[in-house]
Amino acid sequence: MSNNIPFSQVDLTAPTPQNTPLTHAPIGAGLSRPTVPDISEDNEPEEEEEITTPGAAAMLNLVHGRLQGLIGKSSGYIENLPVEQKKSVEALKALQAKQVNLQNQYKRECLELEKKYHVLQTPLYERRHAIITGAAQPTPEEIEAGEKESAKDDPEYTPLPKDAADVPAAAIPEFWLTALRNHIGLADLITDRDEAALKHLADIRIAYLTEGKPGFKLQFYFTPNEFFENELLEKTYLYLEEVGYSGDFLYDRAIGTEIKWKEDKDLTKEIEIKKQRNKNTNRTRLIRKSRPAESFFNFFSPPTPPEEGDDDESDVDIEELEEKLELDYQIGEDIKEKIIPRAIDYFTGKALEYEDLDDEDDYDEDGDEDDEGAFEDDDSDSEDDDVPARRRGPPKGRGGAAANNQVNAEECKQQ
C-alpha cells in the first residue's frame, strides 16, 4: 500500500467479524487514529505504558463501554452475503441442528445409564449403612479386601492384629458428620451449633427423578433428635428440559424440605433478647427477636433464581443471588458426585489428597503469596512434593454452567 494514498480511500474488503460494527466505532469519531510502529528488537517496549491522564482514562472507559454494548449485535456482514453463499449458510445451520439433536439424545441416554448404575450400586450403599450403624457385621472377606486397599494406598500401613477376628466390629459414631467436615466447602458451612444436630445424621442417599423434569434428590436420614421432627430431609435439584448450548444439562432450580423445628431449636435463627421500657408506666419487659443465622441447615432453603425480565432488583443484588445459586449447585453436585460414592475416603481424610486446595485469590500478579514468609525458596525441599496432584471439580452455575453427570463419552460408547 502506498503511503501517499489517504487512509479514507483505502478499499477494506476483508470481512468484518460478527461482533464488529460495520460502521466506524466511536474511537474514530473525534479521536486521532493511533499510530502503530513496526515492532523490532530495537524498539520493542519493555513494559506497557500506564495511562495516567484522567481525561484519557475517562475517554477509554467511555469507548470501552460503548463497544461492550455492540457485543452480540450483527455487523451486517452475513446479511450482505450473496444469495449463493446465504444458501450454504442456511444449509450449515440445518446440519448443526441435526448434530445438536444427536447430542441431546446422547446426554439423555447418559443420564439413563447413570440411573442404571445407581441401581446396581444401591445394595452396596445399603450394606455400607448397615456396617456404619452396627446393624451388620463385616465379613472376613470384606475386611481382608479393605486391608489390601489400605496397603495399596499406604506402604507403611499396619495390618490389624491377628486376634482381631475375635473382636466384633462396632458402629462408627458421627460417621457422616466427620465425612462432611472433611469436605473443604461443606466444612465452612457447618457451625459448632450444627454439629450437635448432625451427629444424628445416619445416612445420605441419592434418588433420581422418574417423572417430570430430569433431576435428582439428596436424602438426609436422621435418627430422633432434640432439634427437629423430620426423620428425612430432602434437597431436590431440577435440570432444564433441554440440554444447554454447551451440550450438558443445566440446573433449573432447587427445592428443599421444610424443617419442622422444635421449640427454640431452630439452628437457622438466633434469638436476641432486648429490654423494652414503657414510657408511661416506666416498667420494662423482655422482647425476643429472631434473626437469620449461619447454619448448614440453610442448605434446605435454597435461593430462588431470578425470573427473566425481572427489573425490580439491582444488578448488584442479582449478581449476589447468582453467586449464592452457583454455590448451592456446587454443594449439591459435590455431595452427589463425591461424598455419597466416596464416603469412606472423606471419613478417613484420603479424599483431601485429591481436592483442589489452591486458592487463586491468595496470590498476587507475580505469583507470590500474600502472607510474607509463607513460601520458601523454590529450590528448597518440601514435604508437599509427595502429595498427589489436586483435582479440580467441574464448574457450576445456572444458565451457563453444566450439571456434571459423571458419565463421559467413552463410558457411553462402551455400553
Image (cartoon, grey):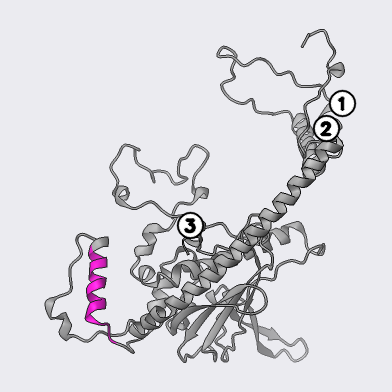
Q: Which residues are magenta?
A: 137-151
Which percent across, then down, holds residue 349? 35, 66
Q: Secondary structure at mark 3?
A: helix
> Looking at the rendered structure, which numbered label has been put on residue 25?
2
Which percent across, then down, holds residue 174? 38, 80
Residue ID for mark 1? 30
Please name the predominant secondary structure of the magenta segment in the image. helix
Rendered view: 197 above or below 362: below
First in residue order: circle 3 vs circle 2: 2
Q: Give the number of the mark in front: 3 or 2.
A: 3
Q: Is residue 134 shown left or right of residue 104? A: left
Label 3 to label 2: alpha-carbon separation: 47 Å
Q: Is residue 353 shown left or right of residue 397? A: left
Which percent across, then down, holds residue 231? 51, 89
Say what amino acid the circle numbered 3 marks. Answer: Glu
Label 1 to label 3: alpha-carbon separation: 57 Å
Q: Give the number of the mark in front: 1 or 3.
A: 3
Residue ID for mark 3? 410
